[in-house]
Structure formats: structure tokens, C-alpha cells
Image (tube, rainbow, N blue to C red):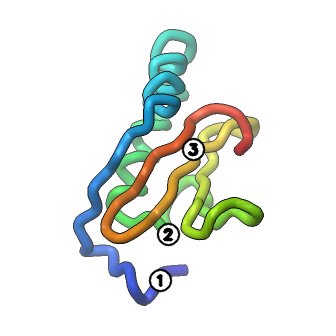
Amino acid sequence: MRRKDAPATREWVGVFHPEFVEDLRYWVQTNRKIALRAFDLIQAVLRDPFSGIGKPEPLKYLPSGTWSRRLTEEHRLVYMVSEGRIDFLQARYHY
């Protein structure tokens, strides 16, 4: 499901919030396999935030443009898409 206003060839700027960086540090220290999966998802999101690996889905009840992808069965990578920018919000827990 690709958005008409966001072609896959668009250049996106990734912004990593402090909570997201802390979540990545946690995964690097506790489970490197999940850490590598998180980095794969980051690359996929920057290529195309609306499709690809991790079953991207828009989140209800949160601000418009907030999406998630599966990191594990329990944990999600959550990000917000806006004008040419992707804010990475969290990489632990379920929203």
C-alpha cells in the first residue's frame, strides 16, 4: 500500500529521538539479533515508510502519520512520517 504523495524514490531524513536511541542501546547489549533486525527495519523505513518488511501499519488513536513495524512478536519499531522526515520514536514494547 503505497501513498501517492510518497514515492519510493523520495529522499527521507531520519531523526532518532533519545528514547529510540536508548532502545537500540538496550537491544545491542541484550540481544544482538533483535538489534540487527532493528537496523534492517530502519533501512527499510528510510527506503519506503509505507511498505516493505515488518508488516508496516498506520497506528490508530495516535497522531496522523504514526506507523509501526514488527521487531518481534512482542516489540514494535514506531515512527512518524511527515514532510520528507521520519521521526523514529521507539524500538521496544508494543506502542
Residue 56: image quadrant is bottom right
Residue 78 disc label: none
Q: Nearer the viewer, residue 47 or 61?
A: 61
Could you tell me how far apart the alpha carbons at marks 1 and 2 are, in whole angstroms? 7 Å
Could you tell me how far apart the alpha carbons at marks 2 and 3 are, in whole angstroms? 13 Å
- Residue 73 picture location, percent across and down: 73, 40
Give the residue type that dot 2 points to.
Phe
Q: SS of the residue at dot 3?
A: strand
How many numbered badges does the structure rendering display? 3
Task: Tell me the residue that label 2 is attached to.
Answer: 50
Q: How crowded is mark 3: few (under 14 residues within 10 Å), some or many (20 or more)?
A: many
- Residue 30 picture location, percent across and down: 56, 12
Residue at 55% from the left image edge and 67% from the top image edge? 65
Give the residue type that dot 3 points to.
Leu
- Residue 90 picture location, percent across and down: 56, 38
Pointers 1 and 2 in contact (CB under 8 A)? yes
Residue 77 disc label: 3
Instruction: Judge left or right: residue 71 versus residue 48.
Output: right
Q: Residues within 10 Å of mark 1 (few under 14, many from 20)?
A: few
Instruction: Judge left or right: residue 94 versus residue 26.
Output: right
Q: Which of 68 and 33 is in front in this view?
A: 68
Instruction: Judge left or right: residue 37 versus residue 85.
Output: right
In the orientation shown, which residue stands out farthest toward the top? Answer: 29
Residue 77: image quadrant is top right
Residue at 75% from the left image edge and 36% from the top image edge? 74
Give the residue type that dot 1 points to.
Arg
Q: Which of 52 and 81 is in front in this view?
A: 81
Q: Mark 2 or mark 1, which is nearer the start of the sequence?
A: 1
Q: Residues within 10 Å of mark 2 (few under 14, many from 20)?
A: many
Residue 3 disc label: 1
- Residue 10 picture location, percent across and down: 26, 73
